[in-house]
Image (cartoon, helix red, strand yellow):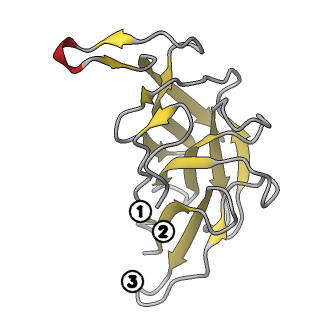
Amino acid sequence: GGAASFPGIQRVMGLPEIAIDERSGTLYVTWSDFRNGDVDIFLSRSTDKGQQWSPPLRVNNDPVHNGSDQFYQWLAVDPTNGDVYVEFYDRRADPDNLKTWMTLARSADEGKTFINYAWTTKPFVGHNTFLGDYPWLTAYGGRVYGAWAEAVSDTKAMVPCGGCGTVGTPAIIRIGIADFN
């Protein structure tokens, strides 16, 4: 899934994630791919222990084929109510496909439909930025907690890296909390 890198960001291999609704046994898997010409986030679900899977459902709700990438997703299921959450990096608001925000998508109907929420209001622009290997997401009792990396600024400042030359714009960890109660 995903791509080796996106403009301004290095090594973004959005690996598939799997989660289970412990109440019903429904399995969910999410990933990113290029099937629509730009990178989108997809989800499939199985209600029979993984024997059969639903057709891929596009999680991000921006127009198809708009040239904006969504990538590096993470998945969580709230064990108290079965709501499904997916967070992902999102470039839909930038026609140049460079500025990046974080979006939280929520499904309250077992992964059949999603509503997208802007989880950040200020974008970042990376310049050879390394975001780490994994974002993080968990949910419990209608509260959702997420963590992800962002470039510190939109400057092209390069940071020394000991004997390895330079790396790009430094990254920091951001925390998001959403309450759907």
Residue bearing mark 2: 28
Q: Earlier in the sequence, mark 2 or mark 1?
A: 1
Task: State the residue at coordinates (42%, 20%).
Answer: 168
Q: Earlier in the sequence, mark 3 or mark 1?
A: 1
Q: Position of residue 145 (x, y in %)?
A: 49, 35
Residue nearer the viewer, 124 or 96: 96
The reply, left or right, for residue 84 in relation to residue 120 is left
Task: State the residue at coordinates (42%, 16%).
Answer: 170
Residue bearing mark 3: 49
Please state which amino acid type lies under the numbered disc 1: Ala
Please state which amino acid type lies under the numbered disc 2: Tyr
Q: Position of residue 56 (x, y in %)?
A: 61, 74
Label 1 crowd (10 A; few <14 / some 14-19 / many >=20): some
At mark 3, the secondary structure is: loop
- Tags 2 and 1 touching, CB below 8 Å: yes
Task: State the residue at coordinates (61%, 23%).
Answer: 124
Q: Position of residue 92 (x, y in %)?
A: 74, 42
Q: Quadrant of residue 50?
A: bottom left
- Residues at marks 3 and 2, CA–CA distance in whole angstroms: 10 Å
Image quadrant in which the C terminus is located: top right
At mark 2, the secondary structure is: strand
Q: Quadrant of residue 60?
A: bottom right
Residue bearing mark 1: 19
Residue 94's place in the image compared with 12, above or below, is above
Residue 92's place in the image compared with 153, above or below, is below
Q: Position of residue 10 (x, y in %)?
A: 43, 36
- Residues at marks 3 and 1, CA–CA distance in whole angstroms: 12 Å
Please state which amino acid type lies under the numbered disc 3: Lys
Label 3 crowd (10 A; few <14 / some 14-19 / many >=20): few
- Tags 3 and 1 touching, CB below 8 Å: no
